[in-house]
Amino acid sequence: MKYKTIIVRYGEIGLKGRATRKNFEQSLINNIKNALRTKQILHTIKKGWGRIYVYTDQINKSIPTLQRVFGITSISPAVQTQSIMDVMSKLAVDISKEVLTKEKSFAMRVTRTGKHNFTSQDVAVKIGSDVVKATNAFVNLTKPDFELFIEIRDDDAFIFKEKIRGTGGLPLGTQGKALSVIDGTKSILAAWYLMRRGCRTDFVTTTKIYDGMLQSFIANWNAHSDITHITGQRKNLYKKLNKIALEKNCDAIVTGHTLYEKQSNCLFDIKLLKQYSEIPILNPLISMDKKTINKKCKEIGLKL
């Protein structure tokens, strides 16, 4: 079965007021476009209520790219068709035949919005019965071997087999700007947490040793960030850092400090940072232990 549609879902955006929601949705769409263009993926995008639809012939290449767009909670490669019972049933049977045998179980998961002469339950019963006849598989709604999803929206229906988890959070660029102080992998993770909350982030470091990792991170997460190197005596570094943050119109400085690490292992002392900085200092990893930090770094593709 040829999939040419990707359903994009978001979470927190749907809880915002009408005006804010509209702005955040547009930011998310712009970020999706930029991410796909960077990977040279030809596509078109359509917005629906609570959904964004990406149309492309490069589904496999698009999936990992969309998974790294902040604000997306899940995606599903889907086949789009008409919300007519017989049409949906034929397509569902064709998809099921690719996966199901008489030894396997399945479940129908149907959702519906709009006005139709059938209910979600009607669709599940009718199409589920047709799938049983075609494959000899059996129904198991609790722990099925295979789930077939049908999402009906007015005149359209989307049929898909999986929901692939996204990064979640808020669209990048919707929540101000931060300056991240880099002294190792964990401080890049700290920046990632701010980015996941919608903050654009630039980076500052005293050495070029992390440039390769930073550039790879920026490219993977579509950050479009700047990297600034500063040198000098320790006291002057604090002043330079504050000056750069103000010049870049940053709302906060981000560090990778934790309660479980000695201050001597960090590039900047947190007390002196607060003393010299004119903007808030954020420490998103402050309560995390080494094991948790290492696990999260691996999850987002940072090499330890």
Image (cartoon, rainbow, N blue to C red):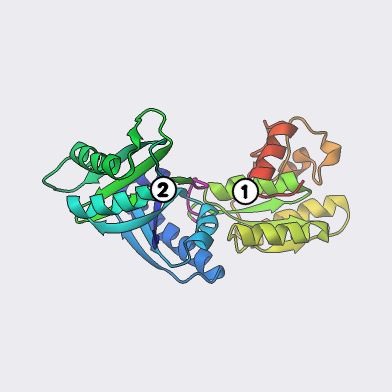
Residue at 85% x, 59% y: name it.
231
Whether residue 281 is visible, yes or no, is: yes
Q: Is residue 294 magenta?
A: no
Whether residue 49 is visible, yes or no, is: no
Q: Main secondary structure of the magenta part?
A: loop
Closer to the camera, 129 or 109? Answer: 129
Residue at 45% x, 64% y: name it.
30
Q: In the rendered view, tell whether residue 127 sits above or below residue 202.
A: above
Counting from the top left corner in percent of width and height, residue 133 is at 26, 41
Q: Which mark is residue 10?
A: 2
Q: For numbered disc 1, what is the local secondary structure?
A: helix
Magenta part of the chain: 165-173
Q: Decide: few, some or many residues near mark 1? Use Cα within 10 Å; few <14, some 14-19, many ≥20.
A: many
Q: Which mark is residue 263?
A: none
Pick whichever of labels 1 and 2 is earlier in the sequence.
2
In the picture, measured across the screen, residue 62 lies left or right of residue 18, that is right
Counting from the top left corner in percent of width and height, residue 233 is at 88, 54
Counting from the top left corner in percent of width and height, residue 39 is at 56, 68
Total labels: the figure holds 2
In the picture, measured across the screen, residue 64 lies left or right of residue 286, that is left
Counting from the top left corner in percent of width and height, residue 58 is at 48, 66
Q: Which mark is residue 192?
A: 1
In the picture, measured across the screen, residue 43 lies left or right of residue 264, that is left
Residue at 36% x, 49% y: name it.
97
Closer to the camera, 166 or 95? Answer: 95
Task: Give the residue type at disc 2.
Answer: Tyr
Q: Decide: few, some or many residues near mark 2? Use Cα within 10 Å; few <14, some 14-19, many ≥20.
A: many
